[in-house]
Image (cartoon, grey):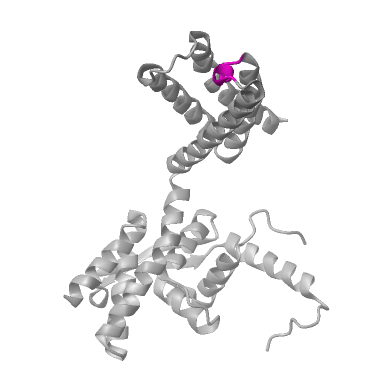
Amino acid sequence: MRLPENPLGSLEHIVLLAVMRLGSGAYGMTVRREIENIARRDISIGAVYATLVRLESKGFIKSHSGEPTPERGGRAKRYFRMTIQGEGVLRNTHEVIQKMSAGLKGLQAT
Amino acid sequence: MRDRILHLAIWFVSRLVPTAEREALMGDLTEEYALRASASSSSAALRWCLRQALASAPPLLWTLVTRSAWISTAGVALLAYVAVGVVELAVNHVFVLSSARPDAVYNPLGMAVTFPLVVLIGYCAAALRRRAPIVLGAMMLCAVTLMTFSSTEAVPAWYRAAYFIVGPAAALMGSVWHSRRRRV
């Protein structure tokens, strides 16, 4: 096990996890909501998009356009899904975190 | 009026993202506004939308700057230019103080001291953006040309001529030094 060459930043990590949790329903606003609901973190849609764009440029996620819908003013959604590289970097980051925090007191989830 | 403010907020945020993501971001905000308006009130939904627009600007602007290679190159070159100015001022100040003569700034020794420092600044600029020293050199060349034609100060010709060559050459040498170290 070693640190990935292109390590994830804290927000990148959270956004990537949100994309993974949402599966085929991951698009900007659902990612933002997921982070707000699960991580209790107030995050702007701009910060989510900036992170998604960065993750896509690193090859960790891929995007495709959906169908335009009337409730969105006729605009299409942009869906995101994790790539194999994304899964790899996430797995590696988690391994590092688990090993580094193993045996440390006071880090148990409340 | 409310609709206008909403459209303005959404339009403002959408201008900060690349064209490929623009449609999706506008749609996301419209969708969330409609959801919040039906769940609570349209004024609360509008307030949320305005907060989103304001909070979204810094990260999107930062992404815009870092993704546009030429903007970051120009930014690094500008910072390096300011650093060169500070170095020149400091060196000139030391020479004027030590000799108590105002024309002591026109001193070959001062130029000899400044030169390696500008090379170092060029090196640091190249480490941040590869082409920044080239822009820095061009900026220095333009500045010296402008000063030559606009300044009424009696600057010795040798000093001006030397600065035409020394400043840009030092910046480019910093770039060459950086690329050689990378190859090693």
Question: Residue A39, percent across and down?
Answer: 55, 80
Q: Where the C terminus of chain A falls, by quadrant?
A: bottom right
Coordinates of residue A79 in the picture (x, y in percent): 41, 68
Q: Is residue B138 above or below residue B79?
A: above
Q: Is residue A59 visible?
A: yes
Q: Nearer the viewer, residue A44 or B105?
A: B105
A26 with respect to A72 (left or right): right
Please report the bounds of the magenta region as a residue range. B101-107
Q: Is residue B85 above or below residue B25?
A: above
Residue ID at (30%, 67%) = B26
> In the rendering, at what x and y percent does residue A46 appear?
41, 66
Q: Is residue B114 left or right of residue B65?
A: right
Q: Is residue B8 left or right of residue B138?
A: left
Residue B131 in sight:
no
Q: Does the magenta-highlighted stretch encompass residue B8?
A: no
Q: Please tell me which residue is depicted at 31% across the width and 57% down the height of the picture.
A: B15
In the image, A8 versus A62, the foreground residue is A8
